[in-house]
Image: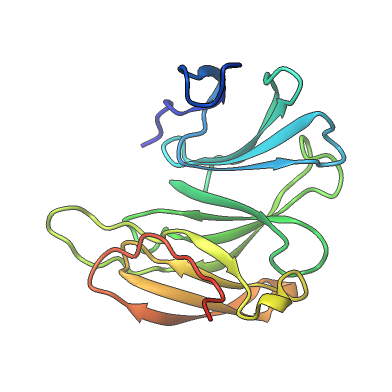
Amino acid sequence: AKMEGGELVWFEHPAEGLTDTTWTEHVVTSGPDVGIQVVQGLKQYKHEVVVFAAEFFNERVSFYRVSTIDGALIAKRYIDTMDILSAYSVTYTDLNNDGIMELMVNNHETDDASNGIWVYEFPTDDWMTGAFKKHTIASGFKNKFSIAVPNMAPGFPYPFYPEVATEGQQAAHIVIAGDGDHTAHIMTPTDAANWQWDMDTIKEEKGTVGALAWDDLD
Protein backbone atom coordinates (compact mmCIF):
# COMPACT_ATOMS: atom_id res chain seq x y z
CA ALA A 1 0.00 0.00 0.00
CA LYS A 2 1.18 3.52 -0.72
CA MET A 3 2.47 5.45 2.28
CA GLU A 4 4.35 8.72 2.66
CA GLY A 5 7.31 8.70 4.99
CA GLY A 6 10.62 8.91 3.18
CA GLU A 7 12.72 12.07 3.17
CA LEU A 8 15.52 13.35 0.95
CA VAL A 9 18.15 14.86 3.23
CA TRP A 10 21.73 16.09 3.04
CA PHE A 11 24.25 16.37 5.85
CA GLU A 12 26.59 19.33 6.26
CA HIS A 13 29.83 18.52 8.01
CA PRO A 14 30.99 20.96 10.71
CA ALA A 15 33.81 23.42 10.05
CA GLU A 16 35.91 21.70 12.72
CA GLY A 17 36.26 18.58 10.59
CA LEU A 18 34.48 15.43 9.47
CA THR A 19 34.42 13.54 12.77
CA ASP A 20 34.57 16.06 15.62
CA THR A 21 30.91 16.95 16.08
CA THR A 22 27.48 16.00 14.81
CA TRP A 23 26.78 16.85 11.17
CA THR A 24 23.86 19.22 10.50
CA GLU A 25 20.91 17.55 8.77
CA HIS A 26 19.00 19.45 6.07
CA VAL A 27 15.65 18.06 4.90
CA VAL A 28 15.09 18.83 1.21
CA THR A 29 11.67 17.22 0.71
CA SER A 30 9.49 14.29 1.68
CA GLY A 31 9.15 11.42 -0.78
CA PRO A 32 12.32 9.45 -1.61
CA ASP A 33 12.70 6.31 0.49
CA VAL A 34 14.68 3.36 -0.94
CA GLY A 35 16.70 3.91 -4.13
CA ILE A 36 18.21 7.17 -5.35
CA GLN A 37 20.88 8.28 -7.81
CA VAL A 38 22.35 11.78 -7.73
CA VAL A 39 23.40 13.29 -11.08
CA GLN A 40 25.31 16.55 -11.38
CA GLY A 41 26.42 18.63 -14.37
CA LEU A 42 23.33 18.36 -16.58
CA LYS A 43 23.53 21.28 -19.02
CA GLN A 44 19.85 22.19 -18.68
CA TYR A 45 20.05 22.38 -14.88
CA LYS A 46 23.05 24.53 -13.95
CA HIS A 47 23.79 24.92 -10.23
CA GLU A 48 21.56 21.94 -9.53
CA VAL A 49 21.77 18.24 -8.82
CA VAL A 50 19.04 15.96 -10.09
CA VAL A 51 18.08 13.19 -7.68
CA PHE A 52 16.33 10.28 -9.39
CA ALA A 53 14.25 8.27 -6.92
CA ALA A 54 12.72 4.80 -6.85
CA GLU A 55 10.10 5.31 -4.14
CA PHE A 56 9.22 1.87 -2.79
CA PHE A 57 6.58 2.84 -0.24
CA ASN A 58 5.10 5.65 -2.34
CA GLU A 59 5.01 3.36 -5.41
CA ARG A 60 6.41 5.86 -7.88
CA VAL A 61 9.45 6.87 -9.93
CA SER A 62 10.38 10.52 -9.68
CA PHE A 63 13.13 13.09 -9.84
CA TYR A 64 13.91 16.10 -7.68
CA ARG A 65 15.92 19.16 -8.71
CA VAL A 66 18.01 20.47 -5.83
CA SER A 67 20.02 23.71 -5.75
CA THR A 68 23.77 23.34 -5.25
CA ILE A 69 23.81 26.94 -3.97
CA ASP A 70 21.59 26.54 -0.91
CA GLY A 71 20.45 22.88 -0.98
CA ALA A 72 16.79 23.81 -1.46
CA LEU A 73 14.26 21.95 -3.58
CA ILE A 74 13.70 23.70 -6.92
CA ALA A 75 11.18 21.37 -8.57
CA LYS A 76 10.01 17.74 -8.72
CA ARG A 77 8.50 15.49 -11.36
CA TYR A 78 6.66 12.19 -10.92
CA ILE A 79 7.53 9.96 -13.88
CA ASP A 80 5.40 6.91 -13.05
CA THR A 81 2.78 6.81 -10.29
CA MET A 82 0.45 4.19 -11.76
CA ASP A 83 2.18 1.03 -12.94
CA ILE A 84 5.58 0.73 -11.27
CA LEU A 85 4.18 -0.45 -7.89
CA SER A 86 6.98 -0.89 -5.31
CA ALA A 87 9.88 0.77 -7.13
CA TYR A 88 13.23 -0.45 -5.84
CA SER A 89 16.22 0.98 -7.72
CA VAL A 90 16.87 3.56 -10.41
CA THR A 91 19.92 3.79 -12.67
CA TYR A 92 20.74 6.72 -14.97
CA THR A 93 22.56 5.09 -17.87
CA ASP A 94 22.87 4.80 -21.65
CA LEU A 95 21.76 1.18 -21.67
CA ASN A 96 21.54 0.67 -25.44
CA ASN A 97 24.57 2.82 -26.37
CA ASP A 98 22.64 5.22 -28.60
CA GLY A 99 24.29 8.27 -27.04
CA ILE A 100 21.14 9.17 -25.08
CA MET A 101 20.70 8.54 -21.36
CA GLU A 102 17.76 6.54 -20.01
CA LEU A 103 16.48 5.40 -16.63
CA MET A 104 16.54 1.68 -15.79
CA VAL A 105 14.09 0.94 -12.97
CA ASN A 106 13.02 -2.26 -11.25
CA ASN A 107 10.27 -2.92 -8.78
CA HIS A 108 10.26 -5.45 -5.93
CA GLU A 109 7.09 -7.53 -5.64
CA THR A 110 5.81 -10.77 -4.11
CA ASP A 111 3.52 -11.22 -7.14
CA ASP A 112 5.50 -12.83 -9.99
CA ALA A 113 3.10 -11.41 -12.56
CA SER A 114 3.71 -7.81 -11.45
CA ASN A 115 7.49 -7.65 -11.12
CA GLY A 116 10.09 -6.63 -13.65
CA ILE A 117 12.67 -4.22 -15.01
CA TRP A 118 11.84 -1.27 -17.24
CA VAL A 119 13.54 1.46 -19.23
CA TYR A 120 12.16 5.00 -19.34
CA GLU A 121 13.20 7.22 -22.25
CA PHE A 122 13.46 10.90 -21.37
CA PRO A 123 11.33 13.47 -23.21
CA THR A 124 13.18 15.01 -26.14
CA ASP A 125 12.02 18.46 -25.06
CA ASP A 126 11.34 19.51 -21.46
CA TRP A 127 11.91 16.88 -18.74
CA MET A 128 9.37 18.64 -16.52
CA THR A 129 6.45 18.50 -18.96
CA GLY A 130 7.31 16.03 -21.75
CA ALA A 131 6.23 12.40 -21.94
CA PHE A 132 8.46 9.56 -20.75
CA LYS A 133 8.31 6.44 -22.92
CA LYS A 134 8.44 3.14 -21.00
CA HIS A 135 9.73 -0.24 -22.21
CA THR A 136 9.66 -3.63 -20.45
CA ILE A 137 13.01 -5.41 -20.68
CA ALA A 138 12.42 -8.22 -18.12
CA SER A 139 9.43 -9.59 -16.20
CA GLY A 140 8.02 -12.63 -14.46
CA PHE A 141 10.75 -13.25 -11.87
CA LYS A 142 9.62 -16.36 -9.95
CA ASN A 143 9.80 -15.92 -6.19
CA LYS A 144 10.72 -18.94 -4.07
CA PHE A 145 8.21 -20.10 -1.49
CA SER A 146 9.01 -19.23 2.11
CA ILE A 147 6.87 -19.85 5.19
CA ALA A 148 8.48 -17.19 7.38
CA VAL A 149 8.78 -14.15 5.11
CA PRO A 150 7.26 -13.66 1.64
CA ASN A 151 10.02 -13.38 -0.95
CA MET A 152 10.18 -10.38 -3.30
CA ALA A 153 11.86 -10.01 -6.68
CA PRO A 154 13.73 -8.80 -8.56
CA GLY A 155 16.58 -7.24 -6.64
CA PHE A 156 19.06 -4.79 -8.11
CA PRO A 157 19.92 -4.76 -11.85
CA TYR A 158 23.30 -3.39 -12.95
CA PRO A 159 24.58 -2.37 -16.40
CA PHE A 160 27.51 -4.72 -17.03
CA TYR A 161 30.29 -4.98 -19.62
CA PRO A 162 31.91 -8.44 -19.72
CA GLU A 163 35.05 -6.89 -21.20
CA VAL A 164 36.33 -3.80 -19.38
CA ALA A 165 37.31 -2.08 -22.64
CA THR A 166 33.77 -2.24 -24.03
CA GLU A 167 32.19 0.02 -21.39
CA GLY A 168 30.44 2.84 -23.19
CA GLN A 169 31.32 1.32 -26.57
CA GLN A 170 28.35 -1.02 -26.98
CA ALA A 171 24.96 -1.85 -25.47
CA ALA A 172 25.25 -3.06 -21.90
CA HIS A 173 24.70 -6.54 -20.60
CA ILE A 174 22.69 -6.47 -17.37
CA VAL A 175 23.40 -8.57 -14.30
CA ILE A 176 20.56 -8.97 -11.80
CA ALA A 177 20.58 -9.91 -8.15
CA GLY A 178 17.24 -11.70 -8.22
CA ASP A 179 16.70 -11.41 -4.45
CA GLY A 180 13.57 -13.45 -3.70
CA ASP A 181 13.98 -15.72 -6.70
CA HIS A 182 17.32 -16.87 -5.19
CA THR A 183 19.08 -16.46 -8.54
CA ALA A 184 21.78 -14.35 -10.16
CA HIS A 185 20.87 -13.56 -13.78
CA ILE A 186 22.62 -12.10 -16.80
CA MET A 187 20.85 -10.37 -19.68
CA THR A 188 22.52 -10.18 -23.10
CA PRO A 189 21.49 -7.55 -25.65
CA THR A 190 19.98 -9.10 -28.78
CA ASP A 191 18.31 -6.03 -30.30
CA ALA A 192 19.04 -3.21 -27.89
CA ALA A 193 17.81 -0.56 -30.33
CA ASN A 194 14.36 -2.09 -29.79
CA TRP A 195 14.94 -2.82 -26.08
CA GLN A 196 15.40 -6.58 -26.48
CA TRP A 197 17.62 -8.59 -24.09
CA ASP A 198 17.78 -12.35 -23.47
CA MET A 199 18.02 -13.52 -19.85
CA ASP A 200 20.05 -16.50 -18.61
CA THR A 201 20.89 -17.91 -15.19
CA ILE A 202 24.35 -17.36 -13.75
CA LYS A 203 23.66 -19.39 -10.60
CA GLU A 204 20.63 -20.42 -8.59
CA GLU A 205 21.37 -20.29 -4.87
CA LYS A 206 19.63 -21.63 -1.75
CA GLY A 207 18.75 -18.21 -0.39
CA THR A 208 18.36 -14.52 -1.13
CA VAL A 209 20.68 -13.05 -3.78
CA GLY A 210 20.79 -9.49 -2.48
CA ALA A 211 23.53 -7.67 -4.40
CA LEU A 212 26.27 -8.29 -6.95
CA ALA A 213 29.72 -6.86 -7.60
CA TRP A 214 32.45 -7.61 -10.13
CA ASP A 215 35.98 -6.68 -11.06
CA ASP A 216 38.86 -7.75 -13.29
CA LEU A 217 40.31 -9.77 -10.42
CA ASP A 218 43.18 -11.31 -12.38
Quick one: 17 or 119, which is closer to the camera? 17
Q: Is residue 94 visible?
A: yes
Q: Nearer the viewer, residue 7 or 47?
A: 47
The answer to whether residue 131 is above or below residue 97 is above
Colour style of the rendered protein structure: rainbow
Q: Residue at (40%, 53%) from the top-left corner? A: 108
- 18 vs 181, nearest the viewer: 18
Residue drawn at 79 percent across, 48 percent down: 123
Residue 29, position as x, y percentages in the image: 57, 22
The image quarter containing residue 44 is top right
Q: Is residue 105 above or below residue 167?
A: above
Residue 21: give x, y in percent of width and height: 46, 17
Q: Is residue 191 above or below residue 100?
A: below
Q: Residue at x 47, y 59 (%)?
A: 156
For the image shown, how many numbered marks are present on the structure?
Answer: 0
Residue 71's x, y, as percent? 68, 21
Residue 13 appears left or right of 5: right
- Specify whether residue 84 is in view: no
| Above or below, 44 relative to 20 | below
Q: Residue furthest left?
A: 147
Position of residue 58 in the picture relative to residue 15 (left or right): left
Is residue 96 toward the left or the right of residue 78 in the image? right
* Quadrant that contains the N terminus: top left
Q: Residue at x 77, y 69 (%)?
A: 97
